[in-house]
Amino acid sequence: MAAPQDVHVRICNQEIVKFDLEVKALIQDIRDCSGPLSALTELNTKVKEKFQQLRHRIQDLEQLAKEQDKESEKQLLLQEVENHKKQMLRKTTKESLAQTSSSITESLMGISRMMAQQVQQSEEAMQSLVTSSRTILDANEEFKSMSGTIQLGRKLITKYNRRELTDKLLIFLALALFLATVLYIVKKRLFPFL
């Protein structure tokens, strides 16, 4: 029958292998993830949790190695612990890359949102310019119409001014004729002999 320490070592090794495989699977999921940022963040959080559990199991194995009675078993387990730590260090680098990838993705999504807002603002400005252009064209057409009306008014005023001058001249001539007639009549009545 196996000693209780051997059972603990075996269980600890199995859990380390299990967590190691789970971390590898999650890292692959992160590489394959093309979904929203929330999914990538959730996968990243799971990787961190599994790394934490893996780190605890390696520490437990190291503690068990230190408690071994036989020096050869102790050295063998410590060597195994070192191998696990080295593997975990390589995986930590992968986790760091995944986290960097996540932050880059988040930045790109933020840039994408900013660009969408800029496009929306540009569209609104363009629409405003189109509306302003229409208003200006309408005002220009109205101005042309008013300009025609003003020209017609000017012609009419000039015509009326000429008519007024003609009327004044006619009135003056009529008055002169009237006065001449009155003078002729007065002359003939008062001085018939002349």
Image (cartoon, rainbow, N blue to C red):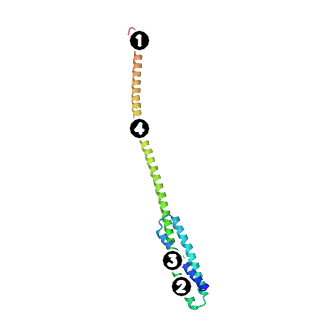
- Mark 2 is surrounded, within 10 Å at the Cα level, by few (under 14), some (14 to 19) or many (20 or more) other residues, namely some
Q: Height in image: 1 above or below 130? A: below
Q: Residue at x 45, y 47 (%)?
A: 131
Outermost residue on the front side: it is 1
Measuring from the top left, give residue 96's x and y in whole percent.
Answer: 51, 74
Pick whichever, 120 or 19, lies toward us: 19
Judging by the rendered image, the residue that carries numbered circle 2 is 80
Type of residue at label 4? Ser
Tag of residue 145: 4
Mark closer to the chain start, 3 or 2:
2
Between residue 61 and residue 192, name the one nearer to us. Answer: 61
Of labels 1 and 4, the one closer to you: 4
Mark identifier at residue 84: none
Q: Amino acid at mark 1?
A: Ile
Q: Nearer the viewer, mark 2 or mark 1?
A: 2
Amino acid at the residue labelled 3: Lys
Question: In x, y percent, where is residue 173?
Answer: 39, 21
Q: Residues within 10 Å of mark 1 (few under 14, many from 20)?
A: few
Cα separation between marks 1 and 3: 137 Å
**Lower sequence index among marks 2 and 4:** 2
- Give the residue pinned by disc 1: 185
Q: Give the distance between the C-alpha atoms of the residues marked 4 and 3, in whole angstroms.
A: 80 Å
Q: Secondary structure at mark 2?
A: helix
- What's the amino acid at mark 2? Glu
Numbered tag placed on residue 91 in the rendering:
3
Label 4 environment density (alpha carbons within 10 Å; few <14, some 14–19, many ≥20): few
Q: Secondary structure at mark 3?
A: helix
| Front residue of this view, candidates 4 and 73 | 4
Instruction: Tell me which residue sits at (47%, 58%) in the image.
Output: 116
